[in-house]
Structure formats: C-alpha cells, structure tokens
C-alpha cells in the first residue's frame, strides 16, 4: 500500500506516491510555474492558484496511468496544509480531500517546512537523532533542534526577510530576473573580490536569530550610488551580497551545532541547492559533525517530501475531511500533532 503526496504551497505543482513498507518511490512529477511568474518578477498568488487548478488533476492522472498505478493502492493522501500562499494551498487541499473522500481513506495534513526538514531521512545514510536542521527557502529561514519526528525547537530564525527572499530581492535590484537566487549564485562565481564589503547583520550577537533586511538595504544604496550598473558591477555586487548573507548563516549554524553537541546537521529548502552555502558549511564544520543535504531536485518544493512526511505521521491519522489552508503556521505549533 502507498501514500499520495500533493504539494501546491507556492509555484510548484508536485505529486509523488511512496510505498509504505519499503519507502520505494512509485511515481513522482513536478510542474514549475517559473516561466509564468517571471513576467512579473515574482510569484502572483492568484495566477499560481489558477495554474494549480488546471494542472494538478491531469498531473496525478498522467502519473498513475504512465506507471500503471491504481488508486486502490492508496492508504492515505498527504497534502501541504501550510505555511504558504492561501489560494494555492486551498487548491491542493481541496483536491486531496476529494480523492480521499472518494476512496474513504484519511487525509494527512503536512507542515510544509517539516516536510523539507524530514526529507534527508529518506537517504540511504540518514542523520541520527537528535540533529540540528537549517531550513532555508524563499519564505523561511529557521535553525531547528530536532529531537525526533514531531518534536522541534526553533533555536533561531530570521527577524525580517528569509534568505531566499533576500536573494530574490537583490536580483531584482540588479535586474537579473526571477527566480533570482540561481542568477546571483551564477554571477558570484565570476568575481574574485569582496568589492563592496556589505554588512553582516547580527553576526556577532549572542542569539541565533538572523536578519537580512539591512543587508538588502546596503545593496540598494550601492546600486543607487553607481546609478548605471555595468555587468562587472552586477558580478561584484552578487559576490559581495552572497558572501555576506552566507557568512551570517554559517556563523549561526556553527554556533547552534556546537552548542547542542550534535553529530549531524541537516540543510533543507530551496536555498540548500546553493553551492557556495554547501561549500562554506563544509569548510567550517568540525569533522565530528556530518552534513546532510537533499539531492538537488528535492531541495525545491516537491511531492515526495510531502508523501514522506505523511508516511511518518500516518500511524495516528484519522478519517476527517476538512479543507483548511494555513498561510502562517509555526513549526513548533505542529509539535506532536500526530
């Protein structure tokens, strides 16, 4: 038997089916809306929701047909309940509840960031509990102590912009298009100097919280001072911004890992695909702390992480069809919600 996972929290329409006993992936598919939102320089929630409506059911049907799967193998449907964009979340939740109702099976509501956090547990060499998790995406930046699945303590978080959001907004200032993170990273590789020496907000504070709005403002002032940006300017600003932002992250995560005396650090979320972040963490982490990253295609939002999180919550699932989307939802509120 198996679980269908559905992810529509933002601009990816994604599904996956995972077998319960073996955790074998029976099918997986994703449609990205990047081209749709690139025209506007960012995600337009109404357009995202409408696109999910048109694509989700055909995506599920095509994957089941292509892989010769029957809906009768499903024990449950797992779906991202939040946090995320309310309209897109409601699309996924409505369709998940409809499928589950027709099959008389449970719907498992999954916390989107918990799904990211748990993704490396699917690896052949998973992290040992307890571990520290760095969750970095376009909407969230969290440092979390994970005692076990369902028991989370937020040790630090951004006080303003998420790391991915700061990347995207900096890219917009440089007219690099959307999504901005990969473009910033690409240009930064071409620079060898920290020409602008941007500030590292809160890097010397005792707490594990982070802030990126001041860094973003420093980039804005640099852009305004130059007036007309050359390609070399864009390259050097990208490098100086990325260096400053990643320095802040690495400093806090290193402190958290040593403070908790853990042996494993898990890095998840869309920004976990950033090569400079990966290399910087590898350079500073003590040899007794093992780093865990999802493979690149599972750093971004995906259906497999939702199906897997649903599988871990399934033992206490009940048949209760209630369509709900939570745009804001603290990870700690989800503790022991089994």
Image (cartoon, rainbow, N blue to C red):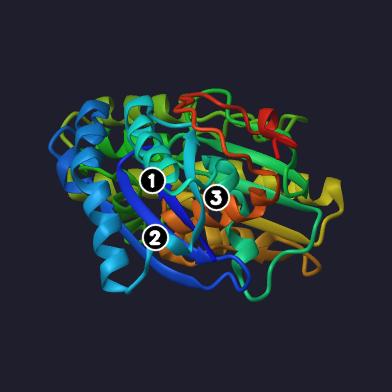
Q: Quadrant of residue 10?
A: top left
Determine whether 296 is above or below 169 in the image.
Answer: below
- Give yes or no for contact between labels 3 and 2 (Cβ–Cβ under 8 Å): no
Q: Nearer the viewer, residue 122 or 99?
A: 99
Give the label, 3 or 1, closer to the camera.
1
- Of 281 and 80, the residue lying toward us: 80
Q: In which image quadrant can residue 241 be found?
A: top left
Along the polypeptide, which appears first: circle 3 or circle 1?
A: 1
Residue 245 seen: yes
Of residues 300 and 15, which is closer to you in this image?
A: 15
Of pointers 3 and 2, the one earlier in the residue sequence: 2
Residue count near mark 3 (Cα–Cα under 10 Å), binned few <14, some 14–19, many ≥20: many
In the rendered image, residue 221, in percent from the top left (x then y), is placed at 34, 24
The residue at 49%/32% (across/down) is: 321
Residue tagged 1:
99
Q: Quadrant of the C terminus?
A: top right
- Quarter of the image for residue 71 reads bottom left
**Looking at the rendered structure, which numbered label has been put on residue 251?**
none
Q: Is residue 73 above or below residue 154?
A: below
84 left or right of 279?
left
Numbered disc 1: secondary structure: helix
Alpha carbon separation for disc pair 3 and 1: 24 Å
Q: CA distance from mark 3 to mark 2?
A: 26 Å
Q: Residues within 10 Å of mark 1 (few under 14, many from 20)?
A: some
Q: Which residue is mark 2?
A: 71
The disc label shown at residue 116, or none: 3
Direction from residue 149 to residue 72 in the image, left or right: left
Which type of secondary structure does the marked residue at label 3 adopt? helix
* Nearer-the-camera pick, 136 or 202: 136
């Amino acid at each position: 038997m198996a679980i269908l996972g559905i992810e529509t929290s933002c601009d990816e329409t994604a599904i996956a089916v995972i077998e319960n006993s073996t955790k074998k992936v029976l099918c997986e598919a994703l449609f990205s809306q990047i081209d749709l939102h690139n025209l506007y320089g960012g995600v337009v929630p109404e357009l995202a929701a409408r696109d999910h409506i048109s694509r989700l059911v055909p995506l599920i049907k095509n994957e089941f047909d292509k892989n010769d799967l029957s809906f009768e193998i499903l024990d449950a449907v797992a779906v991202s309940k939040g946090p995320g964009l309310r309209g897109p979340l409601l699309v996924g939740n409505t369709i998940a509840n409809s499928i589950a109702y027709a099959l008389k099976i449970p719907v498992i509501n999954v916390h989107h960031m918990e799904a990211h956090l748990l993704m490396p547990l699917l690896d052949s060499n998973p992290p040992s509990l307890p571990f520290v998790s760095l969750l970095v995406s376009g909407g969230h930046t969290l440092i979390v102590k994970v005692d076990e699945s369902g028991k989370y303590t937020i040790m630090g978080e951004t006080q303003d912009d998420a790391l991915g959001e700061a990347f995207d907004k900096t890219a917009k200032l440089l007219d690099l298009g959307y999504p901005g993170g990969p473009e910033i990273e690409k240009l930064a590789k071409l620079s060898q100097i920290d020409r602008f020496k941007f500030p590292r907000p809160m890097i010397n504070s005792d707490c594990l919280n982070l802030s990126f709005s001041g860094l973003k403002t420093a980039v804005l002032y640099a852009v305004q001072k130059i007036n007309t940006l050359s390609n070399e300017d864009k390259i050097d600003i990208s490098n100086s911004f990325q260096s400053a932002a990643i320095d802040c992250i690495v400093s806090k995560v290193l402190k958290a890992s040593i403070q908790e005396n853990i042996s494993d650090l898990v890095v998840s979320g869309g920004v976990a695909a950033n090569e400079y972040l990966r290399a910087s963490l590898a350079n500073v982490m003590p040899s007794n702390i093992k780093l865990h990253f999802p493979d690149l295609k599972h750093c971004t939002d995906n259906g497999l992480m939702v199906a897997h999180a649903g599988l871990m919550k399934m033992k206490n699932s009940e048949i209760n069809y209630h369509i709900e989307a939570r745009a804001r939802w603290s990870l700690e509120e989800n503790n022991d919600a089994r």
